[in-house]
Amino acid sequence: MFPSRTLSLTINRPYAEAYAFLNNPANILLWTDGVRDMQLRQASGYVWHSRYFGQDVQLTFTPPNALGVLDLAVAVEGRLPRVHHIRVFPNGKGTELCLTIIQTADESDDQFSSECEWLRTDLQVLKAYLDLP
């Protein structure tokens, strides 16, 4: 078994609106630093492709579903795929988001910690973007 981390975030926006935003693959460019400068192109359905620092990247998004599952698999050429296990659910008039990642076999503890910090920052950008005043 590998170490994992779960990050959670409360978003001040109704669940249906937050889910609709998060379930649109193109919106990832608005709040995720790692792909913000990428040129995404849809390959099919919920599979998108890009290049990052000269490497091919495939992003596979979870299709719409009634359970609030928004898993995202990121496959970078030459590395093991990273799966972001994401769930959103209603929290009163807002939304709760939980994201769990698991350290990959080819990743050092320092690399995993760094990835977690990047995700924490991305989630804060997402919160600032989605939160209603």
Image (cartoon, rainbow, N blue to C red):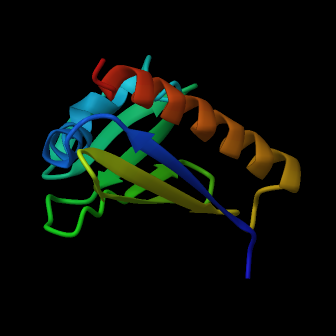
The spot of residue 94 in percent (x, y) is 28, 44
Percent position of residue 115, x then y? 68, 43
Q: Is residue 36 left or right of residue 29?
A: right
Q: Quadrant of the N terminus?
A: bottom right
Q: Is 10 in front, or is 100?
A: 10
Q: Can residue 51 be seen here?
A: yes
Q: Is residue 116 left or right of residue 81?
A: right
x and y, in percent, of residue 123 in the image: 50, 35
Image quarter in which the C terminus is found? top left
Relative vertical location of residue 127 with respect to residue 110 in this rendering, above or below: above
Q: How many marks?
A: 0
Residue 23 image point, x, y percent? 21, 46
Quadrant of res 4: bottom right
Please name the residue shown 28% across and 23% down the image. Answer: 132
Location of residue 15 with respect to 130 vertically, above or below: below
Looking at the image, is 42 positioned above or below residue 2?
A: above
Please state which of residues 46 and 4 is positioned toward the viewer in this rendering: 4
**Left or right, 127 with reference to 5:** left
Can the viewer see residue 81 in this picture? Answer: no
Left or right: where 72 falls relative to 1: left
| Displayed quadrant of residue 130 | top left
Q: Please tell me which residue is depicted at 55% across the width and 61% down the height of the picture.
A: 100
Identify the residue at image location x=14%, y=58%: 64
Residue lying furthest bottom: 1
Q: Residue sitting at 26 percent across and 59 percent down? A: 62
